[in-house]
Amino acid sequence: MSVILLFEIKVPPAESGVAKPWRKRLEALDETQSGGYMCVGAWLEAGAVCFLPAGALIVGVDRTSVTTRRVRLWRVNTRGELTVMRDSTFKSWASEFGDGVRKSLRAALAKYPPRPYGPLPVRAAAPRANTWAAYCSQCRKPVAAGAGLLLGPPGRRSVQHKPGKCPPLRNERRGSCSACGGRVEPGAGILTCPQGAWRVRHDDCPEGERPVLRGVEAAAGAPDGRPVSTSER
Ligand SMILES: [Zn+2]
Ligand SMILES: [Zn+2]
């Protein structure tokens, strides 16, 4: 089995002022279709990062004015960079996939046929660390600069603690420890939510977590003598 190297490629972004830019990985040409529909392949988001092998072709169209279309064809070269194979601007939308462009696409596909390999592994850019201190969108607690992750698309960025790093939720009311059954003063325990039911346990309870107490056992285990059951949440 041969190994196909995938390069991390930034799909060419659209310049400002361009309307309806689109990018596609070109894998085949269906000349029974018209316009951009003849380009067969996975959609790629302009400016996103994806993994592509050397030889992969990307076709892109930018509407640079009401009547002009810029059609480009790129290839991922063996160094993992994009090489421009064609860059043409057409005055009429009818000619953007006319004879000349079709000939270029056909020739490129013949020379660089898409190589079979699993599903196209596309991903957004890797999450970056937060530059400024912010509040976590999950737990609402502060995240120091550089300690969390910056997520979401531009304009709707949010900051989160790294997975599993949100500080634990504290109990606001007194309760019975779900592990040892002892009393937990307000703020001294950690709230957990196994199977959708909120429970409190000592921060560093010596007892391991055990199933929710039931009936008589629970009545015996509750320090204030108050019976507790699974239905009491
Ligand atoms: Zn958090
Ligand atoms: Zn305990």
Image (spheres, rainbow, N blue to C red):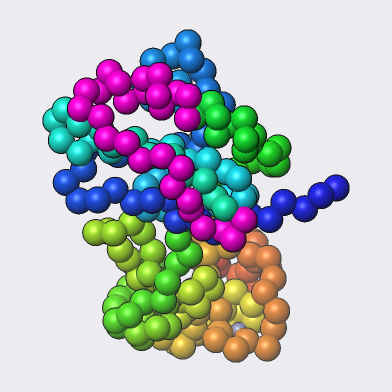
The quarter holding residue 79 reads: bottom right
* Total marks placed: 0
Could you tell whether 233 is left or right of 141 in the image?
A: right
Could you tell whether 153 is left or right of 215 in the image?
A: left
Extreme residue toward the top, this view? 32
Residue 217 vs 70, above or below: the answer is below
Query: Where does residue 61 sit, x and y in percent of width and height?
Result: 33, 36
Residue 31 vs 167, above or below: the answer is above
Extreme residue toward the right, this view? 1
In depth, the one of 117 and 65 nearer the eye is 65
Picture quarter with ligand 2: bottom right
Query: Where does residue 52 sit, x and y in percent of width and height?
Result: 58, 49
Magenta stretch contains residue 95? yes
Extreme residue toward the left, this view? 66
Q: Residue at x 52, y 46 (%)?
A: 75
Q: Residue at x 36, y 77 (%)?
A: 130
Quick check: can you spot residue 82?
A: yes
Q: Residue at x 68, y 55 (%)?
A: 5
In depth, the one of 73 and 152 nearer the eye is 73
Query: Where does residue 109 sit, x and y in percent of width and height?
Result: 58, 31
Q: Magenta residues? A: 78-104
Could you tell whether 219 is left or right of 224 in the image?
A: right
Magenta stretch contains residue 180? no
Query: Where does residue 129 sit, x and y in percent of width and height?
Result: 41, 76
Quick check: can you spot residue 139?
A: no
